[in-house]
Image (spheres, grey):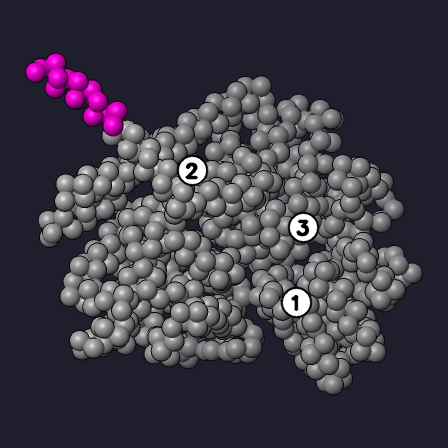
Amino acid sequence: MKTKTFRQNAVTYGIVILFYLICQGLILSGNMSSLMKGLMVPICYYVILAVSLNLVVGISGELSLGHAGFMCIGAYASAIFAVCVDGKMPEGLELFLALIIGAAITAVFGFLIGIPVLRLRGDYLAIVTLAFGEIIKNVVNAVYLGVDENGLHFSMKDSLSLGLSEEGLTIMNGAQGISGLPRTANLTIGIVLVLITLFIVLNLMNSRQGRAIMAIRDNRIAAESIGLSVSKYKMMAFVISAALAGVAGVLYSHNLSALQATSKNFGYNQSIMILVFVVLGGIGNIRGSMIAAVILTILPEKLRFLSDYRMLIYAIVLISMMLFNSAPKAIEWRKSLAERFARKKDIPAETAGKEAR
Amino acid sequence: MKKRRVVCAAMAAVMAMSLAACGGSDTASATTAAGEASESEETAAEGSSEGVFVIGGSGPLTGGSALYGTAVKNGAQVAVDEINANGGINGYQVKWIFEDDEADGEKAVNAYNTLKDEGMQMFVGTTTSGACMSVIAETENDNMFQITPSGTTADITKPANVYRMCFSDPAQGTKSAQYIAEHGVAQKVGVIYDNSDTYSSGIYENFAKEAQAQGLEIVGAESFNSESKTDFKTQLQKLKDAGAELVFLPFYYTEASLVLKQADEMGWAPKFFGCDGMDGILDLPEFDTSLAEGLMLLTPFAADAQDELTQNFVAAYEEAYGETPIQFAADAYDCLYVIKQAVEKANITPDMDMSEICDAMKTVMPEVTLDGLTGAGISFDENGEPNKAPKAVVIENGAYKSLE
C-alpha cells in the first residue's frame, strides 16, 4: 500500500519535473514562442491555485468560492513589501522574503476568516466565501497607502488625504493599484514552488491529519464520535490552502510590473476559474487538477486565431471536456474502448500461444 | 480478485493514456507554438523582403470595455487602409494586427507576446490604462516602440520607448480645474467618479489637487464602482444637499448618460462638466440628447467637426463599420499617422529589427508634428507626452459648440 502511494506521488512529481525539463530545453534552445515563454509563470501559479483549492474542495469536502481573495491578499502583501524594500536588498532574497510574508499574512487571514466561515456547511459556506473574496477585492481597491520620512500614511478616501511630504512615495493608490514591481519570477522558481506545494498537499493527504480530514469529509458524525476535532482539522486544511493561494499571489505580483485588483484577476470570475480547474481535473485528484490548470491556461491563448469566436469555442471545448471526463455515458464508452484495445492485444498473444503448442 | 486487478490495470492504462495524451498535447502545443513562431518568423522575413511594416495593437474586444478596444482596432484599420491606398509608408505596405487583451494586465502581456510571435515591429497599445501599466515593462525590456492611443495613467510614459496620443490623467484633471476656475464657471464643485477605474480616479485626484490650488471648493466627492454603475441617485442627492453648483464627471459617457437622466428625474439641474470619455454621449441610442444641453466637456475630438480630415474619417469609418467613431478611434487613427511620419523621417525600412526601429523612432519623435483628428500641430515632448490643446466644447441644440 505504502509503495503504491509512493509510486503514485513519484509519478506526479515526475510529470512536473519532465514538464520543466521540456520547457526549459525549448527556452534555452530558442524554440519557444514569446507567448509560451510568457505563459510559463502563469501556468505555475494556476497549478498552485488549483492544487491548493483541491485541498479544500476535494480533501476537506467544502465548497470554497473565495480562493482568488486569498491570492489577492498574497499578491498585495508581497507587492507592498517589494515596493518598500525596492533596491535595498538582492532580488533573490527579496523574492524569498516576499514568499514567506505573502504566505504568512494569507494564512493569518485564512485563519481569521475560517473561524466564522467553517461553522457553516455546504451552500452557505460557498456563499460566505464568495462574499469574502469580493470584499477583499473592494477593500484593496479603496485603500491608499503611502510612506515618507514620518512613517506610513493610510487613507480610505484618496491619495491627497494621505498628506505625504514632498519625498513621500505612494505605495498603494486605490484602484490604480501598485506599480513599479520587480519582475523576478521565472519558470524555475515557479516549478520549485509547484513542487513544494505538491509536497505539502500530498504528504498531508497521506498523513494522520490528512486521514482525519478525509474522515470528517466522509462522515462527520462518525469522525466526531471517535474523538476527532472537526473544527481543528477543517481549519488546518483551510489555512494551508489559503497560505498556498497566497504563494500563488506572490508569484502573480512578481510576474507583472503593475498590480491592480479587478474582477478579472481577483474577482469571483477567477475563483470560479480555479474551481473549474479542480472540477475538470477531478475533485480530490491532485494530478488531474494540475493538468487541467495547464491545459485551461494555454487553451484560450491558443484559440486566438478564432478571433471573435474565441470565447464561444473555449466554452464549448470546456463543456465537452467536462462531459468526456465525467458523464456516465462517456465513461462507459471510454471503458468499452479500452476493453476493445485490451482484447485486440490479447488475441495475437493467444494465437501465438496456440502455435507454440 | 483477479477481475479487480484487471480493472485496476485498465484504469491505470486509461490514466496513463490520458496523461500521455495530455503530456503529448503539452509538448505538441509547445512544438506547434515553436513551429508557429518559426513560421511567423518566416512570414515576417518574407514580409520584410516584400516590404511590409507589421504594426500591432491590443485592447479589450470582449467584456465590459469591448467598445473601446473595438474602436481602436477599427480606427487604426481606417488609417492603415488609407495609408496603403496612398502608397504605404516609404513605399512599403502596412499590416495591422490586433489582439484581444480583455483589459487585464496578465492577458495584455499574453496578447503582446502573441503579436510579437506574429512579427509585430511597432506597438499601438494598449487601449486601457491598467493593462498598459503591465505591458510597458515588457516593451521596455524588448525595446519595442510603443504608442498608446488611450492609456491615460501618468506613469505609462515613464519608459523612454513609450509615447502617448491622448491626454494623461494629470493633464485632463488639471486642465478641467483650471478651466472651471479661470472662466468662473462655478465655485462649489461636486465630483462623482468611478473608484474602481484607473482612468476615472486618476483624473479625479489631479482635479482635486488643482482645484485646491485654484481656490475652488470641492463640496463633495462621491464614488461608485464597476459593479454598481446604474444608480447614481444617492451620490447626486448628497451633492445636491452639499450645494454643488457644478458636477464634474470624469468617466465614460454610458454611465454619464445615466447620471444626467437621474439628475433630471430628481429635478436638479446643476452644470455638468466632463472629460474626453464623455465624447460619444450624443450618439448613444435611446438617450434623450436634450438632457445633455449645457454639458461642458474637454475633448480632443468631435465627430461632427466640420474640417475635411474629420469628415473624411467619419465617413470612411461609418461606411466600414456602420457607426459613428468615438474619440478612441480618432486617437488610434492619429497614432498610425504619427508612426508614418516618424518612419518616413527616420528612413526606417521593414527589414530592421524592432530594437533598431525603436532607437531610430526615439531620435525622430521630438521632430514630429502632425495635424491630426485630435488636434492641430500635435508634437511630443521628451517624456513622450503629446502637446495638443484640449478643446472645450459645450452641447447646444444637440451639437458641440466650441468654447473659449
Q: Which mark is residue B67?
A: 3
In this figure, what is the number of numbered marks? 3
Would you place residue B290 above or below residue A29 in this image?
below
Q: Secondary structure at mark 3?
A: helix
Label 3 with label 2: CB-CB less than 8 Å? no
The residue nearer to you, when weighing B155 against B378, is B155
Would you place residue B113 above or below residue A228 in this image?
above
Characterize the local packing of mark 1: few (<14), some (14-19) or many (20 or more) Cα atoms within 10 angstroms.
Answer: some
Characterize the local packing of mark 3: few (<14), some (14-19) or many (20 or more) Cα atoms within 10 angstroms.
Answer: some
The percent position of residue B151, horizontal first and vertical second, equals 60, 53
Mark nearest the camera among 1 and 2 is 1
Farthest residue, direction left: A357
Check the residue under mark 1 and report the chain it is in. Answer: B
Q: Which mark is residue B330?
A: none
Farthest residue, direction top: A355
The percent position of residue A160, horizontal first and vertical second, equals 56, 75
Question: Which quadrant holds the C terminus of chain A?
Answer: top left
Residue indicated by mark 1: B229
| Amino acid under disc 1 | Lys
Where does the magenta region start and end?
A: A343-357
Name the residue located 24 percent from the left edge and 54 percent from the top edge.
A198
Name the residue located 80 percent from the left edge and 37 percent from the top edge.
B319
Check the residue under mark 2 and report the chain it is in. Answer: A
Name the residue located 67 percent from the left edge and 50 percent from the top edge.
B67
What distance separates the C-alpha of mark 1 from that of mark 2? 38 Å
The percent position of residue B100, horizontal first and vertical second, equals 57, 44
Specify the quadrant of the image occupied by residue B337.
top right
A349 in magenta: yes
The residue nearer to you, when weighing B200 against B364, is B200
